Image: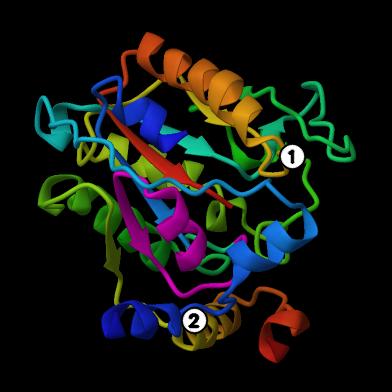
Amino acid sequence: MDEFDENKSKQLRPGLWATVNERYPGSMITKSDFVPLAKLKKPLPESRLTFVSTAGVQPKNSLPFDTVHPVGDYTFRRVPSKSKPEDLEIHQLKYPTVGAERDLNVIFPIERLQELAEEKIIGSLSPNFFSFIGYNMNPEMLEEKLAKDIAEAVEAEGSDVALLAPA
Amino acid sequence: MQRAIEQRGIPTVSITVALDVTEHIKPPRAVFVPFMMGHHFGVPFHKQLQRRIILEALDFLTTAQKSGEVKMLPFKWAEARREAIEIERKYGLRIDQSLTKL
């Protein structure tokens, strides 16, 4: 277990899981099993990539996430992968946006992904990326509704690989 | 979330800044960066760093050996912040005071 502790000390905010679970009992998920790894069907330069974010990034004029609902917001927004950062805004309360306010790419690297697709390092981007907020206090709802809805949408867009950034 | 996508046969990789949360959730593949929450891809205007983090994560799609593996990426927050300040000076961007204090 030495390695585990050493890794833990490398993060800036250790004990996050415990502190959140202390404040909102039962809200944090613990799994004991591992999901079998899916294999890449084709090399990255031929694959369609999608991006899934919990950062509460959404197109301007879309229905804002309900950031003050006591149990959370279990909806998601589609963010067109061709969007420019100025087309997007953030609705969330749970992580510092000091960097994202100046350059959205620090949490939602849409321009970097567009560049990688243009350079054909990534085959293509899915028409939409997917975004929701991390404040969700009911893990069953998160797993049974939101995770399924997004997984379905990711598949429907013909994504071959998915990059995720849980904020 | 990530597990649900992987279960549909789509390979996934996540970027995490909270190692203990990741260890509880056991996503199929994750790369860890020791950065501040909300700054998974680094610091503002540091395109090279943002790009490298994405590429490191995507590389792990093919190099991960077993489910639940977390790869530690060789980045340092202090270094990223220093580089951010240099970039902002170089391009004459307004230097964010909060960044110099972090």
Q: Are marks 1 and 2 in contact (CB under 8 Å)?
A: no
Residue A150 placement, left or right of B8: right
Direction top: furthest residue: A156
Q: Residue at x 62, y 57 (%)?
A: A103
Q: Which span of residues is magenta-colored?
A: B18-38
Q: Amino acid at mark 2?
A: Trp
Expressed as whole percent of the image width and height from the top left, the position of residue A52 reads 48, 35
Q: Dividing the image into 4 quarters, which one contains the N terminus of chain A?
A: bottom left
Q: Is residue B12 visible?
A: yes
Distance from disc 1 to disc 2, alpha carbons, whole Å, reads: 25 Å
Reading the image, the residue beneath label 1 is A89
Residue A22 magenta-drawn?
A: no
The total number of labels drawn is 2
Residue A131 placement, left or right of A111: right
Residue A94, by quadrant, is bottom right
> Do the residues at discs 1 and 2 belong to one chain?
no
